[in-house]
Amino acid sequence: MSDLDRTLADVAAAVDEARLWRLHMEMAAFGATPRGGVCREALTPEDIEARVLMAEWGAALGCSLHMDELGSMFLRREGTDPDAPPVMTGSHLDSQPTGGRFDGAYGVLAGIEVLHALNAAGIRTRRPVEVANWTNEEGGRFTPGVMGSQVYVNPDELPRMLAVRDAAGVSIAEAMVAVRAALPGARPRALRTPVHAFVEGHIEQATLLEESGNQVGVVTGIQGTRKFRITVTGEDAHAGTTPRRRRRDALSAAVAMVSALERMAWDREDECRFTVGRFQAFPGAPSVVPGRVEFAIDLRHPDDAARRRIGDQIKPICEALAGACEVSVVEPQAADTVWFTGAVFESVRASAARLGIPHMELLSGAGHDARNMAAICPSGMVFVPCERGISHNEAENATPADLAAGTRVIAQVVTELACG
Ligand SMILES: [Zn+2]
């Protein structure tokens, strides 16, 4: 057994399942909902409490705290070479308004457990190890999501993101004042500070692992997305007096568009994810012919060419079915499929095999911060099962054993890359 093999065995053995579970239960107290979930939207008082707890844990573990201008936090355990870029792990502590205890929190808490394990095993790495909590991954209160990692890799976007406001009119810049006040010991971290490698732990949010009896998912990549906003404009009219031939009914047109689009996006393989998640008619009165409809499309497909082909048909189909109305189609967001190849992916796969953990390779259907980080360093993800795939839901659940299995893999990946 080589020295590195022994170190990797030590760090995995030092991962403590019961301690990791306690970290989850303590964190879940912030924003706890009566139905067992959490409501911890980005930069709210609950999110700030969670951040303070993370900072306290980091201090107790001998780590320094760093924070960038959008509030993303980094707990840093020094290596023997202070100038080497760190190996980073982590995810996000913010949640959906009716979120669960594991989405995001798992990746951060697995990182905290890795710090515990490194300390307990007395391991000194060459590179620093950092645990990240990315700001506003969920994008519920402030849009868009995965904002912290996006700004970290694209610092030019900082001013635009600081100006983003929530529904109550509070900007991120304004919300950040309380975050800074709560974390006075945080040292400033420059955006795009080099990172050697990034690995993110996350619950799967689907059922492939559970159905196949695997404990760890070696994530091959994250499927690409295209998001569209469609506005159909007709004319408000009296429901009792306006004959069909005089109507410019935006709802009728929009319904025809959605059914045609669903037929167009249908595929035998069931690979295409086509969702109309928002559909609103205005003015929304029972006796008024709707003069305006707004709807949003979330389109995802792992194959870039297929996603391009399907997405490119949205505008022409909407235009063809507008009838007496006008339609505008905008695409505020698009991302190609990211494939995790390279050192992190290889290390995740090798570690799961070395530890004898039942594992499989899978593509992530959901977006994650690792997608952004892949632009600046080798990146990868470790998935663990969640009960019946339920997520973005207060009932979200995972087992202590599965969480620990994934954390052992992350501990080995971090240690291997930080020793290299
Ligand atoms: Zn998440």
Image (tube, grey):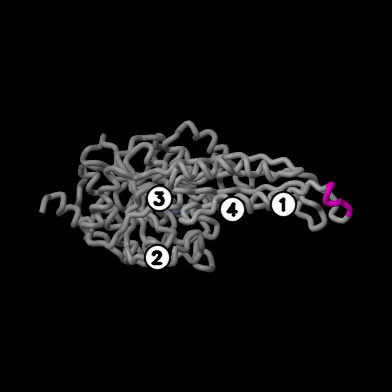
Q: Nearer the viewer, mark 1 or mark 3?
A: 1
Three-letter code, disc 3: Ser
Q: Secondary structure at mark 4?
A: helix
Q: Is residue 386 visible?
A: yes
Q: Is residue 171 left or right of residue 88?
A: right
Camera-side residue of 209 and 351: 209
Furthest-top residue in this view: 156
Three-letter code, disc 2: Ala
Alpha carbon distance from label 2 to label 3 = 17 Å
Residue 173: % across, % down: 54, 39
Q: Secondary structure at mark 3?
A: strand
Q: Is residue 244 magenta?
A: yes
Indicate if the residue with disc 4 has its beta carbon within 8 Å of ligand 1: no
Camera-side residue of 221 and 144: 221
Alpha carbon distance from label 2 to label 4 = 33 Å
Alpha carbon distance from label 4 to label 1 = 19 Å
Q: Considering only vertical position in the picture, is 152 above or below 202?
A: above
Q: Earlier along the polypeptide chain: callout 1 or callout 2? A: 1
Contact between labelled residues 3 and 1, with CB atoms less than 8 Å apart? no
Residue at x 30% of width, y 64% of height: 17
Residue 401: % across, % down: 32, 66
Q: Secondary structure at mark 2?
A: loop
Q: Is residue 329 magenta?
A: no
Q: Earlier along the polypeptide chain: callout 1 or callout 3? A: 3
Tell me the magenta residue range. Answer: 241-246
Three-letter code, disc 1: Ala
Alpha carbon distance from label 1 to label 2 = 39 Å
The crowding category of the residue bearing disc 1, from other C-alpha atoms within 10 Å (few below 14, some 14 to 19, many at least 20), is some
Disc number for residue 281: 1
The crowding category of the residue bearing disc 3, from other C-alpha atoms within 10 Å (few below 14, some 14 to 19, many at least 20), is many
